[in-house]
Amino acid sequence: MKGLEKAKSDGTVDWEVVPYLDLINSVPSLATSSSCYGRIVLMDIPTGLKKDSKFLAKWHRKISFEEFWDALKKANGKSIWFKMEPLIIHISAKDMEAVKKLLEVKNKAGIKRGGIFAISKDRFQIELEGTQRMEVPVKSENFVITEDYGRVLVKEANEKIDKNDKAWKRFEKEFRRVFDVIS
């Protein structure tokens, strides 16, 4: 919780996810540990490894073609990818009852990926992840995509962002119902 408060004060948390984190953290048996609302990014992935990758542009919302194209024209790197990444959230639960409820929320909200990924003597770690995703190479030392294809990619990514937004809304509705949290 201290990490979340620090991220809020530093402005390093993606603000779209904060209301959902606050909702989850309002339940005494739960605490969020990391999250991402969902995002569209341009990344240089020179070796194919995450540790060597660098964000060139990042948006936690739908984008215009012009935003994308301007960022792509400015982007320098060995292997530049356009990605849409889905919602992801890690939640600590104190007991199995809370875990069961979270998994019920996941299922009812239509979030297909998720489950327990770590267990310790005093908590369970749960990960929930959406399925809206795309990853496409768009520029390298040898090529760059066309504007027409760029428009197709932005349209597709924006549609996935809309689906991601709907998944969060379903998650909130089901979370409030299952955990009996009043609006």
Image (cartoon, rainbow, N blue to C red):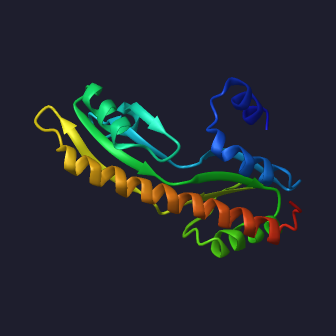
**Total number of numbered discs in the rendering:** 0
Q: Quadrant of residue 56?
A: top left
Q: Please state which of residues 106 and 82 is positioned toward the viewer in this rendering.
A: 82
Residue 167 in view: yes
Q: Position of residue 30 (x, y in %)?
A: 80, 54
Locate the N terminus and report the quarter of the image it occupies: top right
Is 177 left, or right, of 51 in this rendering? right
Q: Residue at the spot x=29%, y=36% of the render?
A: 69
Q: Please state which of residues 40 and 113 is positioned toward the viewer in this rendering.
A: 40
- Residue 155 against residue 81 in the figure, above or below: below
- Residue 14 against residue 129 in the figure, above or below: above
Is 64 left, or right, of 60 in this rendering? left
Q: Position of residue 86 (x, y in %)?
A: 50, 54
Is 7 left, or right, of 122 in this rendering? left
Is 32 left, or right, of 40 in this rendering? right
Locate the C terminus and report the quarter of the image it occupies: bottom right
Q: Residue at the spot x=20%, y=49% of the render?
A: 148
Residue 120 in view: no
Q: Please state which of residues 153 and 143 is positioned toward the viewer in this rendering.
A: 153
- Residue 4 against residue 169 in the figure, above or below: above
| Name of the residue lying farthest toward the left | 142
Q: Residue at the spot x=77%, y=32% of the render?
A: 5
Q: Position of residue 151 (x, y in %)?
A: 28, 49
Q: Position of residue 88 (x, y in %)?
A: 57, 53
